[in-house]
Amino acid sequence: MEKEKLESLLIDYIDGNLNDAERAMVEKELQNEGTAKLYRQLKEVMDLMANSKVSVPGLSLKQNLKKHYKLRFQNQNQRVGNKFSSSLGYCELQQLSY
């Protein structure tokens, strides 16, 4: 069986998304040591992903980025004098405000 197809089936097997025939086919393939090793690796990765928590950047990072962009676009506008750059900088700063 192609490795990509096997990986897809193993992921669905781990998630419990196979019908009886597909599950039986995967369980037969799991008798092969290479397939069993691949299963263990995928299971470990999927378990880690399922148990990981999402990190949200803190307020200080947002404030520092906003300050950085403001200074960056002020400096850029002083050198170039480009109104479009100023508008673009303002839009980016507004996005950080949300």
Image (cartoon, rainbow, N blue to C red):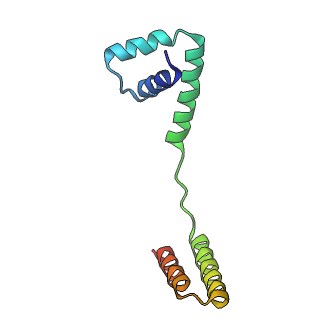
Vertical relation: 23 (above or below) 78: above
Q: Percent from the top left, x then y, of residue 54?
A: 52, 53
Q: Number of labelled discs?
A: 0
Front in this rendered view, residue 51 or 96: 96
Which residue sits at x=58%, y=78%?
Answer: 66
Which residue sits at x=64%, y=84%?
Answer: 76
| Quadrant hosting residue 25 | top left
Front in this rendered view, residue 78 or 4: 78
Vertical relation: 36 (above or below) 45: above
Which residue sits at x=51%, y=83%?
Answer: 90
Front in this rendered view, residue 81 or 13: 81
| Quadrant hosting residue 81 | bottom right
Q: Percent from the top left, x then y, of residue 12?
A: 41, 27
Vertical relation: 56 (above or below) 34: below
| Quadrant hosting residue 33 | top right
Q: Percent from the top left, x then y, of residue 3?
A: 53, 21
Left or right of 20, for residue 65: right
- In the rendered image, which quarter contains the C terminus? bottom left
Q: Percent from the top left, x then y, of residue 53?
A: 53, 49
